[in-house]
Amino acid sequence: MPKLAKRMGRAKPSAIMVIADKAKRLKAEGRDVVNFSIGVPNFLPGEHVYDAVRAALSKDSGQYGSNRGREDLLDAFLKHLEAGGFRGYERKHCAVAVGAKHILYNLAEALLDEGDEIVFATPYWTSYLDIAEILGAKITLLPCPPEQNYKMTPAQLDQALASKPKVFLFNNPSNPTGMVYAREEIAALAEVVARHPDTWVITDDIYNRMVFDGVGYHNFLHVRPELRDRVIVVDSLSKTYGMPGWRVGFMAGPEAVAQALVTLNSNHITNVPEVVTAAAVAALTGPQDIPARKCAEFAARRDEVLAALAAIPGVKCPRPQGAFYVFPDISCAFGKSHGGRKIANDVDLCAALLDAKGVACVPGSAFGEPRALRISYTCPQAQLTEGLKRIREFFAELA
Ligand code: PMP
């Protein structure tokens, strides 16, 4: 048989999907599984989105759409940007694609030649690593351990940018940690970014409407709008609007970058489907109250998870203020055993937790932090409480 391309030797299936699939399999076999593994919102968009889809279907002409994104969708996104504090953008600065993941892949393809350097923090969202590896980029990781609240310092960033990497990829609020940078932290990092003009900056802000405790959401451009010629903002409908399966992501940035994504779209997908476009316009222009209501619920759930973890001796957890994840340091369990099964690391722990207690969490090593595991807390409330009880039992049974 002929060989696959070499780059496929570097491509891995998403580690999150591997554990989510195992949880699904066990459930299908009749096991009582609590799924904390997958990062999906626990709400659907409002009826106005489905109405818009029905109306679009009834007048669908069956034609190809725009490579950049339909004009009414670009206009709706521009209004969304403005509501998020981003001013001065026009359609020519934007592009739409099949989810933020697709936008990020296309940006990496548009900005990175093989061997070019990309910098991002650990813990990182899994696909950052995989996308950079598939494209053969040189990856520089900025370690942001639990001891520094999973956040990078200006000094760390300054040092990393000194080698003039092609791209700095920044995620706020963070998946997997849920941490949110305060305005003064963003201002300090933006000052560093401003001193390193040779680097593109991608800000993956897809959880920007999911921030609690009044900490607010801030982007480098909010404090230094003059960075607009090399900061690229990424957003998505998936989390904010409860629409992960609809696959709509956006970018706003320099015209040439947006144009590069249009060129890639014209060769990859042609257009985001027309009925999906109608749904996206409805979501962005309809009632905007769901994220605010969900934030109150998620903050309460975050508190419940933190309280349960605080009751486990040795487990440490910085307090997240956004998204819907908690990322505790569970390394106190390493070297112990559960029911005779040795727990050497996070992968062993997650496997034993799933087998013994039916609770699915993602090992931290999937995000570059092997001392932790990720809990996504959007499952039904009764399952959340039950799953946390089982995690406490599991740790109490370690010997
Ligand atoms: N970035 C981050 C940080 C994410 O958590 C996710 C989804 N889990 C994505 C990007 C991709 O989002 P989308 O569904 O829009 O492709």
Image (tube, rainbow, N blue to C red):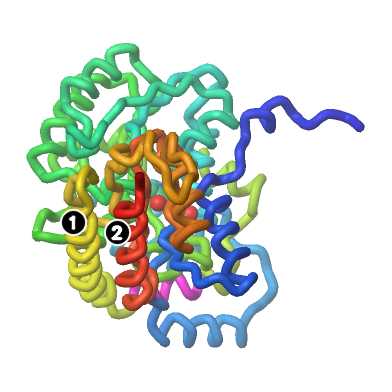
- Furthest toward the top, the residue is 163
Classify residue 399 as left or right of residue 213: right
Name the residue at 56% across, 21% down.
114
Q: How far from the left and from the top, in percent, is residue 217?
A: 18, 53
Residue that appears at 52% across and 38% down: 260
> Which of disc 1 and disc 2 is earlier in sequence?
1
Judge: label 1 CB < 8 Å from ligand 1: no
For residue 190, which numbered disc appears in the image?
A: none
Instruction: Tell me: 10 left or right of 186.
Output: right
Q: In which quarter of the image is the N terminus?
A: top right
Q: Quadrant of the C terminus?
A: top left
The answer to whether one can see residue 96 in this image is: no
Residue 147 pos. (x, y %): 18, 33
For badge 1, the amino acid type reads Ala
Magenta span: predominant SS is: helix
From this viewpoint, which residue is outermost toward the right?
1
Which region is colored magenta? 278-285
Q: In this view, does 258 lie above or below 269?
A: above
Task: Check disc 1 and report the residue beneath it.
Answer: 311
Tell me the amino acid under the disc marked 2.
Arg
